[in-house]
Image: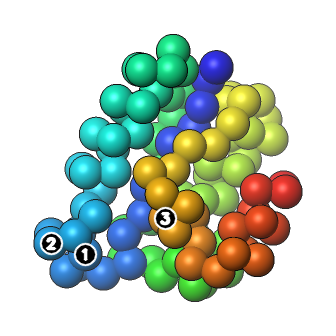
Amino acid sequence: MKLVAYVRVSTETQAVDGLGLDVQRKGIRAWARGNSHRIALWTADEGVSGSNGIETRRGLLDALNAIEDRTASGLVVYKLDRLARSLTVQEGTLAK
């Protein structure tokens, strides 16, 4: 399956000390390889809170547009909290 990968960090500290973009990319690559999926597109939001609405997150919008225009068949994130902090925002985003 062709997927779009979305990575996000909300703070500079998180990028360096926590779940940085490189950690997320490595994890997604390993998962995709292990499950015979191909990453067709990588998108990112750096320094953007997961509590922000999707309209302020260019990388997430690009990811969703890639699915809509069939560049990819699905979305992969390292952890669901990278998609959004709120469960209702996660569900609303996944429903699109």
Q: Residues within 10 Å of mark 3 (few under 14, many from 20)?
A: many
Q: Position of residue 81 (x, y in %)?
A: 52, 68
Determine the image quadrant of residue 60.
bottom right
**Which residue bears the numbered disc 3?**
82
Q: Is residue 93 left or right of residue 38?
A: right
Side of 17 relative to 34 (left or right) = left
Looking at the rendered structure, the kind of residue marked 1 is Gln
Looking at the image, residue 67 lies above or below residue 12: above
Residue at the image position 24 percent from the left and 50 percent from the top: 22
User: For the point 62% across and 48% down, which residue is it?
Assistant: 63
Q: Residue at x 36, y 70 (%)?
A: 9
Q: Quadrant of residue 1?
A: top right
Q: Secondary structure at mark 2?
A: helix
Marked residue nearer the N-terminal end (3 or 1)? 1
Instruction: Write down the residue under mark 2.
Output: 17
Residue matched to label 1: 14
Q: Residues within 10 Å of mark 1 (few under 14, many from 20)?
A: some
Q: Is residue 27 above or below residue 90?
A: above
Mark before the other along the chain sequence, 2 or 3: 2
Q: Position of residue 93 (x, y in %)?
A: 75, 63
Q: Residues within 10 Å of mark 2 (few under 14, many from 20)?
A: few
* Residue depicted at 57% across the width and 78% down the height: 85
Q: What amino acid is at disc 2?
A: Asp
Quadrant showing the C terminus: bottom right
Q: What's the residue type where badge 3 is placed?
A: Arg
Mark 2 touches mark 3? (CB < 8 Å): no
In this orientation, does residue 83 appear?
Answer: yes
Decide which of 48, 93 is in the foreground and name it: 93
Q: Are marks 1 and 2 in contact (CB under 8 Å)?
A: yes
Q: Residue furthest left?
A: 17
Image spot of residue 38 (x, y percent): 51, 21
